[in-house]
Each structure stands twice: as structure tokens, then as C-alpha cells.
Image: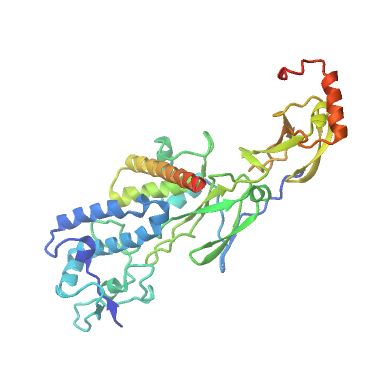
Amino acid sequence: MAAPTRRPLGVSVVGSVPRVEGSLSAGELAAAAGISEARLARLVRLGLVEPAAPEVSRFSAAAAARLRRMLRLHRDLGVTLVGAAIVVDLLERLDRVERELARARASSA
Amino acid sequence: MAVKFRDYYEVLGVPRTASAEEIKRTYRQLARKHHPDLQPAAERAKAAERFKEINEAYEVLSDPDKRAKYDALGPDWKGGQDFTPPSGSGRWTTVDVSGSGFEDVDGFSDFFASLFGGAVRAGRRGGRDGARITMPGADVEAELPVTVEDLLRGGQRRIGLDGRNLEVDIPPGAREGTVLRLAGQGGRGVNGGPAGDLYLHVRLQPHPRYRVMGDDLEMELPLWPWQAVLGGPVTIETPDGPVTLTVPPGTQSGRRLRLRGRGLPRTNGTRGDLHAVARIVVPERPSEAERQAYETLRGAAGVPADRPARA
């Protein structure tokens, strides 16, 4: 059977057509986070940013959201990047728990 | 043009006599408490507003020049009062608020702009020199409910967000939990700061027929006892339309029949598989002829009729 037709990803908004990104290259991620590629490479070596798969330098869009959040916490609150990574991990876990709780409440209601 | 006075001391909750050290400490505490990134997703937008107020207050009170200028207005102003900036005294910078449109929506307040100008652009956020005016817009996270059909066809979903309508192409390979980034579609920046990103979290809705297992789909294949015993071609509805599969003779409940390449599309253009899971269905109200046939079958089976079946 034929593979589904690949359409260019896009979002139509009046006046502009931004892209939908499911994953980013190292360069795209560095640009998204407003840091240099060298700094990104350092963060990857430190394990603070993880590629989508080992040995592949592509990153999920979730990694972009995470890195931007880490950098904001680092900048605004003065926590170290390692500290910010821990905060983000815990916040993600909290989000998950809250979502599961909401689902459990909805199904028992 | 009258703007509303802002009581920056009240925003930070410090006395007018507070030292620079005290102001900094209070700001750090408030930032920790109200930082949008530390709030649950649902409360982030509200927290961003509050955080902006706190930043604006800190911007003024942490900068000796700005604080002196603000203090010179006198201690009698109350937050929310109509305020007309003093003019012509030469002590006041020329106000250029054309960039901000004099709207208290995106940037610091029009009160701030009327005192310090709206088009200043300098320094990093939290900078020691206090010259921090532009701010990037907030990243916005939202959920994107999708159906199995959306994942199969890579369909477009129209979503409404803050009064905007976005049409989002669901990329092949998207799954429950996949995050999609729409650069620059988040909160607007402050005074020319870059807009934030929009992150959509794919949330897969339950489907009445198909369960999603990674790249594969799973569906039920109800079979009559004679179909399961004798086997033969059975036509089923799949996401790609009707497909005839061959049920092997002696198919037990729970047996998985695999239809290769009929599952979810992957990023590399291939597709996962569709599994039809056999489930034997017995006739609840057999006709007389059926009942007789089953009685004959009972005699022909050659196993004790009063013992469980052997698997």
C-alpha cells in the first residue's frame, strides 16, 4: 500500500504561515533557545539536553520547550542550569500527575 | 492623556523606605513564587501578567535613577488613580510610546511608558544596571486533541487559541504526547521583544474500534464458532477500507492476525501494522436448526461433555 502523501507542514494564520516542528536539528534548537551551537553541544555533553535518539543529533520539540524553560529559570531566578533541569523534571512530573488525577476524577464522576 | 498610576512599592509589598538589598530580596522571593514557568499550565497566562507587574516594579525600584524619578512624584498617589505625567519641566524624558501604542497589553504599563518612555531597549533581563525593558513573550503550552483518524491521515486540525484560529497540520509519526512547536506563535513580546513559542501536546482521544500500541493498531475480530474452527476468508473494516483476511482453521480467542502496513504512519514514510484479535462469539439465541447442529457436535466431539474444554 502506498505511503500516505507527505504534505509540507504548516499552519495557516491570517498574514503568515509558520511551520509546525515535530523535531529540530542542533542548529534549529540552538536558535530556538537563543544560544550558540557550541553551548548547546556542551549542554548535551552534560546530559542537560537529550537528543531524540542516541547518536542522532535531532531533538524533539519537547526538548526545545524544556531548554527554553530551563534557560528562563536560570536567568530569572539565578538557579544553576543543573538546578533548572531538576526543576523542569519535577514540573513535568507534576504536570503528568495532575493530568492523570484529572483523568481519574473525570472517569469516576 | 490620563493613565493609571501604579504603586510599585505596593506591587512588591515593600515600604517606601526599603533598601536596595531589601527590594532585591523581595523581588527574588516574588519571582520564585510567581514565575510563570513554575505554575501549572492552566495558570501560566495569569501568572505571566503578575510576573510582568513584578518585573516592572523591580525595573523601576532597582534602578536608582528611575526610583528617584518615581519617588519625586510624591507619596500621595494611589494605585489606579488617573495620572498625567508632569511635562515641560525638563526633568522628564520625552515620552515615545508610539511603539507600544499606549496600550497596557503587551509591554510594561502605559504608566511606565509615560514616565520612562516606551521604546527603550537595552540590557539583559535581571540586569544589574536595571536597564531592562524588552521582554520575550511567554511560551504557551496547549493540548491538541487528535483522533486515530487524524494520525492516520495526518489531517489538519483547526484550533482556537486566544481568539486566533490556527490550522495545524498533524505530522506523520505524531503520537500521544508528541509535542509540536510553532515558533513565534506564543505570547507577544514586550516592546519589541521576540514572541514566545506555542507548544502543542498531542492528546490521543480513545477510539471505539482501534487501540494504539506504538506504531501498531489493534482491533477486535469477533468470529462465530464455525468461522474459528473451520477458518476461511473474513472481510473486515479497516482504516483503509474493507480488507479480506484469511482466518486459519482452529483459531482460538486472543489469536492475533497481523495486517502488515495498515497501522499508523511513521516519520520515515512506512506504517505500523494492524492486529485483528480473534474473539469467539457464540449465538445467544440459536435457531432450532443451529441447536440441533450443536447437539450433533457435542456427540461428535469425543470428549466428556461434563468437563471443561482443554486449551
- Which residue does the image show at 31% across and 55% down from the upper left? B34
Give the image's coloring scheme. rainbow
Residue B180 point in image, percent of width and height: 53, 51
Residue B247's place in the image compared with B22, above or below, is above
The image shows a total of numbered marks equal to 0
Going 19% across and 65% down the picture, which residue do you hit? B9
Nearer-the-camera pick, B56 or A103: A103
Q: x, y (%) of residue A86?
A: 36, 40
- In x, y percent, where is residue A63? 47, 44
Q: Residue at x 88, y 33 (%)?
A: B289
Residue B298 visible at all: yes
Q: In the rendered image, which quarter is residue B47 located in?
A: bottom left
Please give the name of the residue rendered at 15% of the width and 75% of the height, measured from the top-left corner: B76
Q: Is residue B167 above or below residue A83?
A: below
Q: Is residue B248 left or right of residue B13?
A: right
Quadrant housing the N terminus of chain A: top right
Quadrant assignment, res B281: top right
Kindly tell me whether residue A36 is visible in this rendering: no
Q: Nearer the viewer, residue B243 or B266?
A: B243
Q: Nearer the viewer, residue A80 or B165?
A: B165
Task: Give residue B31's position: percent from left, percent from top.
Answer: 28, 54
